[in-house]
Amino acid sequence: MLKKIQEWRGKETSKSLSLKEEIMKHPIPEHIAIIMDGNGRWAKKRALPRVAGHHEGMKTVRKITKAANSLGVKVLTLYAFSTENWKRPKLEVDFLLKLPEEFLGTFLPELIEENVQVRLMGNKTDLPDHTLRAVEHAMDQTKENTGLVLNFALNYGGRDEILRAVKALADDVNENRISSDQLTEEIFSEYLFSNLLPDPDLLIRTSGEIRLSNFMLWQLAYAEFYFTDVLWPDFNENNLYEAINSFQLRGRRFGGI
Ligand SMILES: CCc1cc(N2CCCCCC2)n2ncc(-c3ccc(F)cc3)c2n1
């Protein structure tokens, strides 16, 4: 039995290595965005509380961040907390909002070592001080890093983001800081939380759900979408390579022929 498990693991490793070698021969998506779904279901399958799934999902964040950085991905955006998540039970929300400090408390030295730059995308005002302090400390400690930009979407909603951008733009027009005929898609993008970041090339959503859930509605206009039944806590490097391989096999036309 043990021999069979070792043989299987060997096959998995060699499959993963050969797939990594294969995708490294072709352009790697510059910006990958991930809707990290399936944490609650992962816990339920094991008769564990939902928060156990969130905690396991946090370990996957580290695994996939390292894998993406190793591939030369420039930006990895992770949908960690949506504006809709406030509707969940208070205990679960409180647990979720403690995860950034737990993750950074453990892995910030490793992120610094790996030249990763931490960034926040979302409405900061409603986040608890302890959460914001941890994230802003990490952003400050990594602001000079030039490797992967690890962009956490926290208290983020696509419609909230667009509405805030429109309001700020309307103020600028009213104050004559810009005229509407000067407005371009590029200038509008600067009003979004994701300003200065390239749009995602590849969106990955785990756990079999096939919808956007109010995520990066403007920025995903031309992204390739990859949906997998794998639950986020089970998502591994090989699953990432499979998503990138699928991306590379598609011919992107950006609306052209
Ligand atoms: C605020 C909610 C939340 C949830 C969460 N989960 C739970 C749901 C999704 C699966 C992953 C684990 N993670 N995992 C890392 C972070 C994190 C966020 C910012 C940061 F700077 C460093 C780490 C995180 N944040």
Image (cartoon, grey):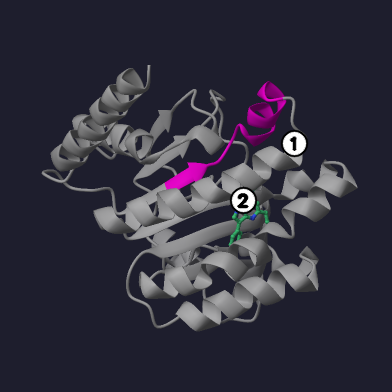
The residue sitting at 61% across, 31% down in the picture is 38
* Disc 1 target residue: 50
Residue at left offset 74%, top offset 60%: 98
Q: Residues within 10 Å of mark 1 (few under 14, many from 20)?
A: some
SS category of the residue bearing label 1: helix
Residue 165: x and y in percent read 61, 63
Q: Secondary structure at mark 2?
A: strand
Foreground pick, 171 / 56:
56
Question: Going by the image, does 186 lie left or right of 90?
Answer: left
Q: Residue at x 29, y 54 (%)?
A: 30
**Figure quadrant of residue 193:** bottom right
Of badges 2 and 1, nearer the viewer stands 1
Which disc number belongs to residue 80?
A: 2
Q: Is mark 2 within 8 Å of ligand 1?
A: yes
Residue 139 sits in quarter: bottom right
Please give left or right for residue 84 compared with residue 211 in the image.
Answer: right
19 versus 171 height, above or below = above
Bounds of the magenta span?
Answer: 33-46
